[in-house]
Amino acid sequence: MFNLLRYFSLTSAIVVVIATVSVITVYRYLAVDDIIETAEFENEGLTQSFADQIWPAFSPYFRNVDGAELEALRTGVETAALQLALETLTQGLPVLKVRIYTASGQLAFSSRIEEIGARDSGGADTGLTDALEGRTSSALLRRTNYVMPSGVAQDRHLVETFLPIIGPNSDVQGIFELHTDVTDLMVRIGETISGMVLAILLAFAALYGALFLIVRRADGILKDQYQGLVDSQQKIQARNEGLQREITERIRAEKALISASEAADAANRAKSEFLANMSHELRTPLNAIIGFSDTMLQEIFGPIRNGKYVDYIRDIGSAGRHLLAIINDILDLSKVEAGENKLEESEFEIGENIRSCLALVRGWAEKGQVELTAELPQEPVSLYADGRKFRQILLNLVSNAIKFTPKGGMVAVKVWRDESRATYIQVRDNGIGMAAADIPKALAIFGQVDSGLARQFEGTGLGLPLAKRFADLHGATLDIESALGAGTTITVRFGPNRARPIEDAAAQEAPKPVRAKPRLVS
């Protein structure tokens, strides 16, 4: 038997691990990126100060460095003066090391005198190369043993920045390399991450505890029902073996089977009702997410300085709207399955409704470069039906047609009434189509036609089944004609009893809503 409690625990553990790792990874990436950006900004300011205050006095010295003897460079008066000037400039700043390169890439000065004269910075070829081409480059490094002018430091995090010194002719006159100590910031990030992990684990633990009690109760009920079903099957088998001898036992077994069937139907209805209630509960927080994201995008309470956050907020709002649309479809479908979706019928003009529906999807069609047309009767055609569900049928069919029609394709809507006064609404496209064998799958709940073309498009598989069930509620039929690569034609036929105006109202009975038989929604 399926152990619900075991699988719930395993799934919860996987979700906790994935959620924790994802949150920590994203936070650390953003925090480190912010540290590098801040350090680079500060280093740029320090470099600008150096270029304005010190560089003019020493630029002749740097132009003559290439070819000079190393000992002369390391013991020269200019080196000592430059050392003193840089110590004054960086006093009080978390700068561990300063290097200055000539325009040819030679290390002309370092706060560690023994490094002067080298041709690179100990392996940082990429950053030096970028700076020689006029681009600022920064990277976060970690050194177990970091050699500074004052000695060796253990386990340091630093931001290495290469900044070009640009001359008046936009040429690179030298390179300024700074090593900024960010160890304390990285330690604080680590402490924050530890706190976040603890908070996430505590939150999930509380949620898990509450859900565990619910699942354990449900698991116990399922086990009892399963055991009851097994016992019933054993009894039925024993009664069947003694059918010829014990007619009374046979009748009793049949009654027990009927009772079990009624219990199963009740469980079906309970599950559909539970799904409908849960959909209602999910819509409330989703509406809050969408509303808050819109408020933040409008920057009502102040500007958002980082453009990345604006993109993230826009993605959150878009995902929330998409999820809300899916939940609304599930809610409508669960109501139909539970037999609670009743028709609110009235007389309305079909053409006006079709034009308003097409106006809603025209922007989507234009974005996908799909031509959208409508062929409507010259005379107004009225229908007695549920106007909202009629529009939802049409929107689902037209949206599906647009989604599966490539650029340059066509989607056409046509309306007509035959001699029997039956009303037809037809949606035709020349999109990717589907095989005849796949049509039942497309009409199934959450059905997805498994083809290489169809899998390119997003969707939950609820649009077409929902349109079919709304048509059934009206006593209408929904027919599909399709072929791979040749497009799809879907025709909805409303019976003559729904045509308006009715010439002889007394002779024709008003249409009665059709209740769908409750069925398990999985």
Image (cartoon, grey):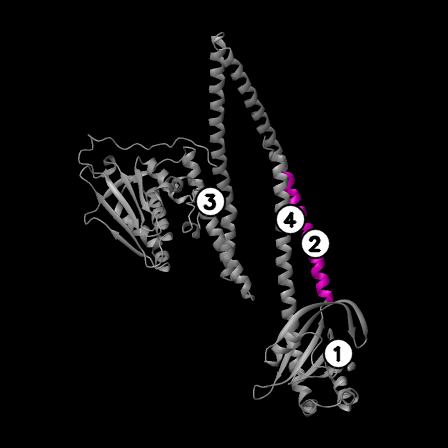
Q: Amino acid at mark 1?
A: Gln
Against 408, is 328 above or below? above
As shown in the figure, which amino acid type bears the numbered disc 2?
A: Gly
Q: Is residue 443 left or right of residue 149?
A: left
- Does 76 appear in magenta? no
Q: Is mark 3 in CB contact (under 8 Å) with mark 1?
A: no
Name the residue at the right extreme: 151
Residue carrying label 4:
17
Q: CA distance from mark 1 to mark 4?
A: 45 Å
Depth check, front residue: 104 or 75: 104
The quarter of the picture where residue 123 lies is bottom right
Q: Earlier in the sequence, mark 3 or mark 4?
A: 4
Number of dots carrying numbers:
4
Q: Residue at x 67, y 47 (%)?
A: 201
Numbered disc in front, either 2 or 4: 4
Q: Which residues are magenta?
A: 183-211
Image position of 188 (left or right of 419): right
Mark 1 vs 4: CB contact within 8 A: no
Q: Which residue is mark 1?
A: 91
What mark, if any, has residue 327 been given in the picture? 3
Question: N-terminal of the two: label 2 or label 4?
Answer: 4
Q: Say whether disc 3 or disc 2 marks the residue closer to the N-terminus.
A: 2
Q: Position of residue 250 (x, y in %)?
A: 48, 12
Task: Please report whichever mark, 1 or 2, sits nearer to the chain's N-terminal start.
Answer: 1
Which numbered tag is attached to residue 142?
A: none
Q: Which residue is mark 2?
A: 195
What is the three-letter code of the residue carrying label 3? Ile
Q: CA distance from mark 1 to mark 2?
A: 34 Å
Q: Residue at x 64, y 63 (%)?
A: 31
